[in-house]
Image (cartoon, rainbow, N blue to C red):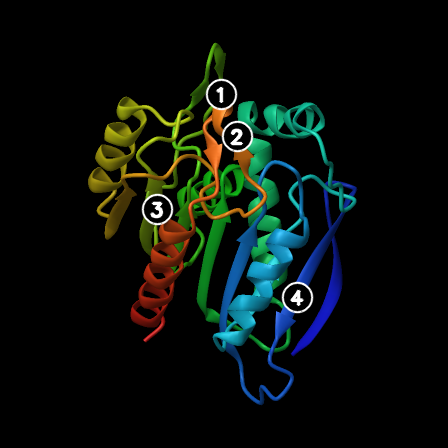
Amino acid sequence: MKTEWVEYQLDGKNFRGYLAYNENTTKPRPTVVVAHAWMGQDAFARQKTELLAKLGYVGFAVDIYGDGKCVNSSEDAAALMMPLFIDRDTLRKRIVAGYKTAGEQMMADPAKMGAIGFCFGGLSVIELLRSGVFLKGVVSFHGLLGSALGSTKAHTVPAAQKLHGSLLILHGHKDPLVSKEDIELAQKEFTKAEIDWQMHIYGKATHAFTNPAADDPESGMMYHPKSEQRALLTMKNFFSEVFD
């Protein structure tokens, strides 16, 4: 496996992506953008990028915060995430910049692009879908689906007139950050947009159920191995279908 850092820019700001692919690749391969959770582009995001490379794809972990920022506390993560949760226009521009950089890599096939994201990254890849860029498929793992967190409301921007690609939402039934209304609104939105969407809800799973480091039951963030295994298998099947 070949891995390397890729620098890119947007609006005068520097970003640091992480690229992974099979070094024996001789022709362009389907390429999957990986959007990190609220802590920043960390080892978890890079591991998922390498997993995609092992599956035969090109993986590219984007840097949504810029300058490779990655923090270790919930307080610091919230300080980085919330401005972008609110400012959906800037969030969309940043995830699109990462998508474009991924598609420009020599071994990438720009005709077969996908994306996955975790928690805040799940929201980010859904915004990528809403942007109207060409995609084959998008997967949200325990993503934020709504336009509000508590009393904080996002400044949303309209989706493009025509959206491209299928959508797979992998959600924990006990996720306290996503309401029933959020789920219903997302389903209505993507049905109206004529997106081929599906949603899998795991009964015993909370928020962050794919992350082995998640261990905060009071906040509703717990690792659930069985749901993680099911979700990753569903992702594999999904990409096998949409990239066929």
Q: Nearer the viewer, mark 3 or mark 2?
A: 3
**Label for residue 59?**
none
Of the residues under marks 3 and 2, which one precedes in the sequence?
A: 2
The spot of residue 126 in percent (x, y) is 42, 43
Q: What residue does disc 2 label?
A: 88
**Label for residue 170?**
3
Q: Nearer the viewer, residue 221 or 241?
A: 221
Q: What's under tag 4, amino acid-wise?
A: Leu
The spot of residue 98 in percent (x, y) is 61, 53
Of the residues under marks 4 and 1, which one precedes in the sequence?
A: 4
Q: What's under tag 1, amino acid-wise?
A: Ala
Rounded to the nearest whole Å, what is the CA distance between mark 3 and mark 1?
22 Å
Q: Secondary structure at mark 1?
A: loop
Among the 4 quarters of the image, the one containing residue 203: top left
Q: Where 31 falls versus 162 (above or below)?
A: below
Q: What residue does disc 4 label?
A: 19
Q: Nearer the viewer, residue 46 or 61?
A: 46
Rounded to the nearest whole Å, what is the CA distance between mark 1 and mark 2?
7 Å
Q: Where 120 falls versus 45 (above or below)?
A: above
Of the residues under marks 2 and 4, which one precedes in the sequence?
A: 4
- Lateral position of residue 69 relative to residue 212, left or right: right
The spot of residue 168 in percent (x, y) is 32, 51
Of the residues under marks 3 and 1, which one precedes in the sequence?
A: 1
